[in-house]
Amino acid sequence: MDTATSLPRVVVIGGGTGSFSVLSGLKEQPILLTALVNMADDGGSSGQLRDDFGVLPPGDVRKCLVALSDAPQELRELFNYRYEDGPLAGHSFGNLFLSTVERMTHDFNESVRIAGKVLRSKGNVVPITLDNSRLSIAWDNHKIVVHGEGKIDVMEFGHGLKNPELFLEPAAHINPAATEAIARADVVVIAPGDIYTSLGALLVVDGVAEALQETKATVVYVCNLVVKPGQTTDFSVADHAAEIERFAGGPVLDTVLYNDARPPKTLLDKYAQVGELMVPVRQSELAQAHYRAFGRKLIASEAAASQKGDLLAASRSFIRHDSKALADAIMELVGTASKT
């Protein structure tokens, strides 16, 4: 018997930073691993490359490829290297590599395959869609509409602006390879990430909700550690899960995994000043949920989170998931994932 085909199949759905944390730990496990990646990014380097060359956004795909890479550290750092000046200022080498190969082959799937080969990725990276679409958000029957992932990411929703509608223009359709991956999975992990600009943007791609509703896989959501000020300020663990299911069109979650440890008070106080509070765990809400919910110590130590060379160290917050702890918790679920 082919040993590889008997390994559990785990699919991770998400954007860049959250998927990076999950994939970095899972790549060391005895599983067949696939990352399905959000393709709505239109800010920064990805946005400029989209505008200048008409290519698909490479940034989140690059992060996932690097997370899965088994190549020497120098090569991983090369793909993450960001030019600081000149005409390429703001672009990372990996983004330029992916966009260049796409221009050469006219096939973004092929550019991802080649980059994965160069980086010796221990798993597959699959764009959730190959359609060139932009994210929009709306309230009050489209009386209020904001266009563009970059604009949505930095806006504050304000009082009364709840339960927004997300949509892609033009409509995007799921990559057939992503449909197949979800259908064949034993466990599907929805990674932590921004609800509206990362996870929601992925879930509203035509065909994704249907694939999640139809799969026999155990579907797991890894909840965020901190709220996003102005967007999910008062959201509990259950509130995050409810928004995921709203965009997925129904009760698709089997398990919600959340952090039940707290960082040092000095760090909490630091982020409380800018509204980045830990996501509250309201056990009464979770007790009434249709999914299983359980907590684990999933938060990385401040020293580990800020270590030199960490891809995520450039981001402001040091309150982030511990990749190994995440992988251990997810593997617990993989071991009991078979559905009858």
Image: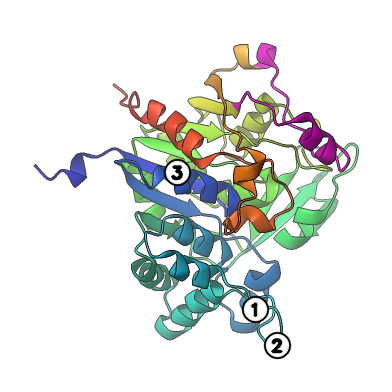
- What is the residue that sits farthest to the bottom in this orientation? 87
Given residues 147 and 335, the one toward you in this image is 335
Secondary structure under badge 1?
loop
Residue 169 x %, y %: 65, 62
Residue visible at 49% across and 46% down in the picture: 13
**Does the residue at mark 2 contact the one at mark 3 (Cβ under 8 Å)?**
no
Quadrant assignment for the C terminus: top left
Q: Which residue is mark 2?
A: 86
Disc 3 residue type (three-letter): Gly
- What is the residue that sits farthest to the right in this orientation? 159
Residue 251 x %, y %: 54, 27
Label 1 to label 3: alpha-carbon separation = 28 Å
310 with respect to 232 (left or right):
left
Q: Is residue 129 magenta?
A: no
Residue visible at 79% across and 29% down in the picture: 265
Given residues 252 and 122, the one toward you in this image is 122
Residue 312 x %, y %: 62, 54
Secondary structure under badge 2?
loop
Residue visible at 36% across and 68% down in the picture: 113
Disc 2 residue type (three-letter): Gly
Visible residue check, residue 148: no
Disc 1 residue type (three-letter): Tyr
- Position of residue 260 relative to residue 222, above or below, is above
Q: Residues within 10 Å of mark 2 (few under 14, many from 20)?
A: few
Visible residue check, residue 269: yes
- Position of residue 315 relative to residue 298, above or below, is below
Secondary structure under badge 3?
helix
**Does the residue at mark 1 contact the one at mark 2 (Cβ under 8 Å)?**
yes
Quadrant assignment for the N terminus: top left
Residue visible at 55% across and 68% down in the picture: 80
Report the disc number at residue 25.
Answer: 3
